[in-house]
Image: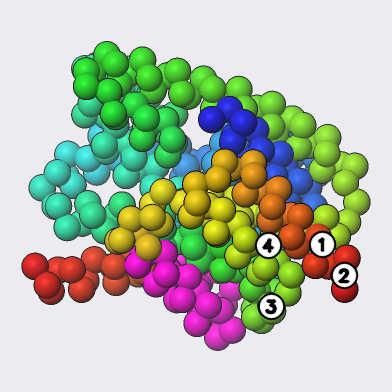
Amino acid sequence: MALTFFSLGVTLQVALIDAGTSAGRALAASAVIFSATSQFAWLAVREGGGSDWAAVVAGWVVASRYGILTTSLVPRLPAGVARRALAALNAFDPNVAIAIQQPTASGVEREFWRTTAAMMLGWFSGITVGTVVGNVVGDTAQLGLDAVFPAALLAIIGNLLRTRDGFVAGLAGGLICLGLLPFVPAGLPIILSVFGAVLAVAPVRGRS
Amino acid sequence: MTMSVAVIVALVIGVWGQRLVGAFVLGPWLDRQPKLTRMAGLVPAAVVMAVIVQLTVAQGRTIEVDARLAGVAVAAVLVWRRAPFIVVVIAAAAVTAALRSLG
């Protein structure tokens, strides 16, 4: 877990610095935003020629999954608004997935924070190393680093894509983006891809 | 392009705020909307895949297929085979870099 977040942190920093954000700014951004997928979404829209605000909206849409994750995590935690809010703010895909497998509320909380600690250790060391590497690495395309960014995202949603619904939603979202890309303003294909999730639910509803 | 302070603040609010909304507003409400809950759970698959498409086969607003696609395709197979994250990332870079050096 720590290793995954470490590599993700390195990857993101190299991408941000390569795109033209100063090393210090990139480090600060990753430390406070702490959401590689949102930052990659912002970057993808900006590199596609989209406006800053279209890029921010894309980042928000990608982060909407955290809101979904907390809906499954929070009811399983011990009571208390403060400790629930604190855990909710640290919800990520892996720590929630691992924590909610625990049978008791205290077990959920314990596993959650244990996984979170490992993730944070990996993330903060990763973005630090990535900031140094991003400053010295020369031609990122020559090293194949531009393929690393989408590959990392693929690994993040891998478990979801392995389910039937997740696969259909992913396929639909990808095709929506591919189809719209040449015709609408940059950023919009990514924002409109949320309808891929609607399409994934639609046929099943008709069958049942 | 640089991440402006306004962009960072906006992303911070969106990323952290949506967690609180999910925990204390959306959660209790979604409990009564099972279909919406299912759909909401699929949004990341759709949207992140769109970001992947943008980063893999596009250059700005034009479709452009190059060595990136091969690297990501290898990554897809590795993800499907449940390879560790670091293996996926290194393989994607290696395949893409190798193809480019071959010209």
- Depth check: A147 or A124 in front? A147
Q: Which chain carries label 4?
A: B
Choose the circle earlier in sequence order: 3 or 2.
3
Residues flagged by tags 4 and 3 on a common chain: yes
Labels 1 & 2 near each other (Cβ < 8 A): yes
User: CA separation, marks 3 and 2?
Assistant: 16 Å
Which numbered marker is on residue B65? 3
Crowd rating for badge 1 (residues with CA inside 10 Å; few <14, some 14–19, many 20+): some
Crowd rating for badge 4 (residues with CA inside 10 Å; few <14, some 14–19, many 20+): many
User: CA separation, marks 4 and 3?
Assistant: 12 Å
Which numbered marker is on residue B102? 2
Q: Residue at x 91, y 51 (%)?
A: A138
Which residue is outermost to the bottom?
A183
- The percent position of residue A67, horizontal first and vertical second, equals 35, 43
| Residue bearing mark 1 | B98
Q: What element carries label 2?
A: helix
Q: What residue type is labelled 2?
A: Leu
Magenta highlight on residue A181:
yes
Crowd rating for badge 3 (residues with CA inside 10 Å; few <14, some 14–19, many 20+): few
Labels 3 & 1 near each other (Cβ < 8 A): no
| Residue bearing mark 4 | B71
Q: Measured along the vertical axis of the image, is residue A36 above or below residue A125?
A: below
Q: In this view, does B80 lie to the left or right of A19?
A: left
